[in-house]
Image (spheres, grey):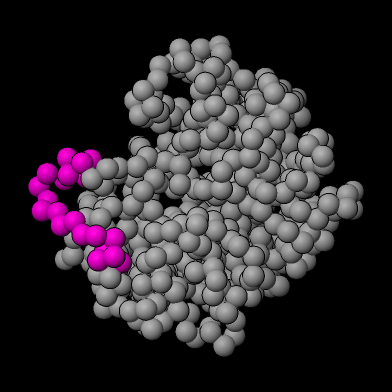
Amino acid sequence: MYIIGISCFYHDSSICLFKDGELVFACEEERFTGKKHDSSFPHNGLRYILDTYNISLDEIEKFCFYETPTLKLGRIVKNYIRHPISSFSFTKQSLINWYKNTRTLRKEVGDNVYYQPHHHSHLYYSYYTSTFKDAVVVSVDGVGETDTATVAIVKDGKFTFKPLMKYPQSLGLFYSAMTSFLGFKPNNGEYKLMGLAGFGDPHLYYDKVSSLSMKHFVWDKSNEIMFNENLSKALGIPNRLPEEKILQVHKDIAAATQLVYEHNLFSLLDQVAKETDIRNLCLGGGCAYNGVANGKIKNITPFTELWIPPAPSDAGSSVGAVLGYLRHRNGFAHRVKETPFLGPEYSDEDIINQLPEVKLKKVSDSKLYEIVSQELQKGKVVGWLRGKSEFGARALGHRSILANPFIDGTRDKVNSIIKKREGFRPFAPMVRYDVQSEYFHEEDYVPYMNQVVNVKEEHQHLLKEVSNVDGTARIQSVTRTENPTIHKLLTKFSETSGNPPILLNTSFNVRGQTMVLTPRMAYDTFISTDIGVLVLNNFIIIK
């Protein structure tokens, strides 16, 4: 029995497959197309599922869609009623897009579709990937159909839903609009704003940023821009253009934006906490990628336990849509297995067929870890492709670029020469979980790189290549059971180098490109950059 979940038409299009109630595959469409945040119907993902699992469309019990088009239509109409003149063109284009998207979905999968409210998809995905029995589940993003933030209180298997914020009020759209003001692409560059914030003084512009209102923003009136000239007047500077130099004032505004976001998020969480004695929190929606805020939740709010899944944005909602359908059909849904490794996998034969011109050398597991550890100790940067690709925005050791963080200049080398991106962008440390608390002020398991925590003061100089300017780091906890290959590599690297079992980890791609999926993509990136070592399963290539 097969069920397919689909999320598409806004950003981070994805598709997933459940077999007999269990999640067996999930992948973003961008991994196949190479188009970052691809929003199109996941044709490639669907084709991969049908071919790989040898099934036909007739064998699909139900297609599950991550939101409800009729509710979205209602929001479009209500928004037009509020602004009949200023939003006319915006409404016209929104209606055209709505019609095209609903027609495309019907054309591709027919009428056998279960429609799930947008935020419910986020909430189900976040809860069912956790281990909590009772939990407060909060979804915060740009916009669903009408809500922009929603909570579900889960107690004894019952979900009680409540909206927390209604469109056009939106923490997610506020953060995206400020991202755009600072010269980065919205729905893409928010992590750049978050990284830039660490270099600024949040208090210099806090009062101005916290006083902003809908008179400064036009996301409910325009498809082209998110803010108007009032924003520049309020902040006292013009918006930065993408090619312009980043100044200290931009860093200060980024810092203020981050702090305003945090204060509003924590206020929402405090509000929810007053309504229940449950202290387990699951967080979902695109805003759950804000690792800086996430890392402060347990210290600032009443919640004592925190869970964030590997793909909390709209990509994960393809999974949440199916979970909602299973609850609708059965009255319950099974927990989702705790792994982000749900995408395509390539055999040795696939690698050989994709790279016929390359002389490949295959080694044993033990030899592979030995060679790679030695090359890392020499300062080589490693491109690493093994196993099923990650689901979610973070590379977690199956499609990663790895480097030795104990060599001075490693961050600048990877940023400028290999990733070819802005120098202020930090990198994340992957750390063996059994020693994590020796180096970081965090004892909880953080497997998906979604929390920024403090580096212990005595180790900040040692770990400066994988730390933010403020002495924090976005960690990835690695255990033998959940990520055995990387655990072995960290152990061998530590034995070889005498350093802690910590490596710099970043996604296997260069600026403007998506994370590599196939061996061919990995090899082409390897050849076009200064990556010194390429690992494809147990094949190894050294420049």
Q: Which of 170 and 378 is in front in this view?
A: 378
Residue beneath the point at 57% across and 79% down: 438
Q: Quadrant of the C terminus?
A: bottom left
User: Would you place residue 439 above or below residue 220 in this image?
Assistant: below
User: Would you place residue 17 above or below residue 31 in this image?
Assistant: above
Percent across and percent down for residue 418 are: 30, 64
Report the side of 534 relative to 177 (left or right): left
Does residue 61 appear in this view? yes
Residue 44 on the magenta segment:
no
Does residue 6 appear in this view? no
Quarter where residue 413 is shown? bottom left
Q: Nearer the viewer, residue 217 or 539?
A: 539
Residue beneath the point at 54% across and 75% down: 435
**Magenta stretch, residue numbers:** 349-369
Percent across and percent down for residue 74 are: 71, 22
Percent across and percent down for residue 242 are: 45, 56
Quarter where residue 263 is shown? bottom right
Report the side of 224 relative to 441 (left or right): left
Quarter where residue 314 is shown? top right
Q: Count numbered badges in the picture.
A: 0
Residue beneath the point at 26% across and 47% down: 519
Percent across and percent down for residue 386 are: 33, 52
Residue beneath the point at 36% across and 23% down: 54
